[in-house]
Image (cartoon, helix red, strand yellow):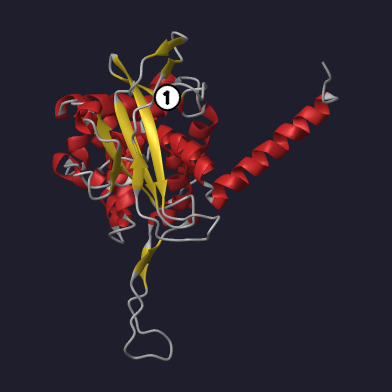
Amino acid sequence: MSEIGTSSNVSRAFERYSIVQEQRVRTLYNRHRALFAEFVVEQLLTGSEVVEDPTSSWDLLWPVGQEMYRVQVKCSGSYLPRTRKHGTAAKWDLTPPKQGWDSISRSDLEAGHHCDLIVLARHEGDDIEQGWTFATLSLDELGGAKSHNSKSLGKPLVAPDQLEVAALEALGVSTRDRLELSSVALVAGLVAAPHEAWDRLWASVDAVVPSDLRSTWEGGRPLPGSDSVIQMPWVDYSDALNEVITALYDVRAVVDFDWMGWSGLELYPNTAALSDAPDADVIRMLTTIVRSERFSEGSLKAAVDSGMFGALLTRLRAWDMARRPDAK
């Protein structure tokens, strides 16, 4: 058997393969976009993993509590690069396979779907990094349908940060169980963050001086040369505070969850109320404060000025020091 040469040839081949594969995904070729959709879903369903065997009857395995769910991902894109056509209608082929393969037991399966959940991924536009929405179907919801479009689904497509909730609902997981599972997953995300990221977070927090916390409102005045056009007001945050926010993302203390529908601001109206808050709710509060800044300018400033942001960082640091007593 002939070989392709030295190990350097193999390394270069893998390097070129990776580069071209990414180019194909970003160009939105259907097959490559569909495969990429599996990895997008993997990032959105906490703890899920894409299976290695491409012939498996499911694309991901998703542990939820004591259960292991099999997830199949179907993708539909609006842009076709071959014809450079935009606006292709959403449609997912759900024809049951004529045969299946169990990648765990390494055995053949009879015809039909062999998953617990089907995730329908929809991509709009020509930028692979945005434009994603999703729908979920249990096999009971699928029934005998062999295809679906956006109208026949009977349910709306949801944003990426709502996929996990929609998936759990489709699987019949109760609201209480969803909250408990979500809490476990949030704390597990903190544990999985690299120690170096945690060290960077506390270094950035320690580098903040009082003047860094005195953010100011800017704008709100007529633009130069115009008496009628008013610049929208915005808050000028210090570089030091922005570094803390970036570091919070790196340790997974700012996460994707339905923060708009969470009642945390009512549960924890002041710093005193945080004393008995679960660790997962500290993450939820940090996420709500940081992400709401995009929709309500000054939310972060209010949390800093009230002491809430500092109190949350203190709780987060106490949690980290308890598990890493030798950390800086």
Place of residue 30 in the rendered image (x, y in percent of width and height, measured from the top left): 50, 45
* Residue 171: quarter of image: top left
Place of residue 64 in the rendered image (x, y in percent of width and height, measured from the top left): 30, 21
Mark 1 secondary-structure assignment? helix
Q: Is residue 171 left or right of residue 212?
A: left
The answer to whether 109 is drawn above or below residue 281 in the figure is above
Q: Residue at x 45, y 19 (%)?
A: 325
Q: Which of the two residues, 269 or 192, is positioned nearer the viewer here?
A: 192
| Residue 177 visible in the picture | yes
Place of residue 191 in the rendered image (x, y in percent of width and height, measured from the top left): 42, 24
Q: Which of the two residues, 34 or 280, is positioned nearer the viewer here?
A: 34
The answer to whether 57 is drawn above or below residue 261 in the figure is above
Q: Which of the two residues, 296 or 40, is positioned nearer the viewer here?
A: 40
Q: Which of the two residues, 314 or 12, is positioned nearer the viewer here?
A: 12
| Residue 252 visible in the picture | no
Task: Report the residue marked by disc 1.
Answer: 191
Place of residue 287 in the rendered image (x, y in percent of width and height, measured from the top left): 32, 43
Q: Is residue 128 left or right of residue 113?
A: right
Farthest residue, direction front: 98
Q: Residue at x 52, y 41 (%)?
A: 31
Tag 1: residue type? Answer: Val
Badge 1, how many Cα within 10 Å: few under 14, some, many 20+? some
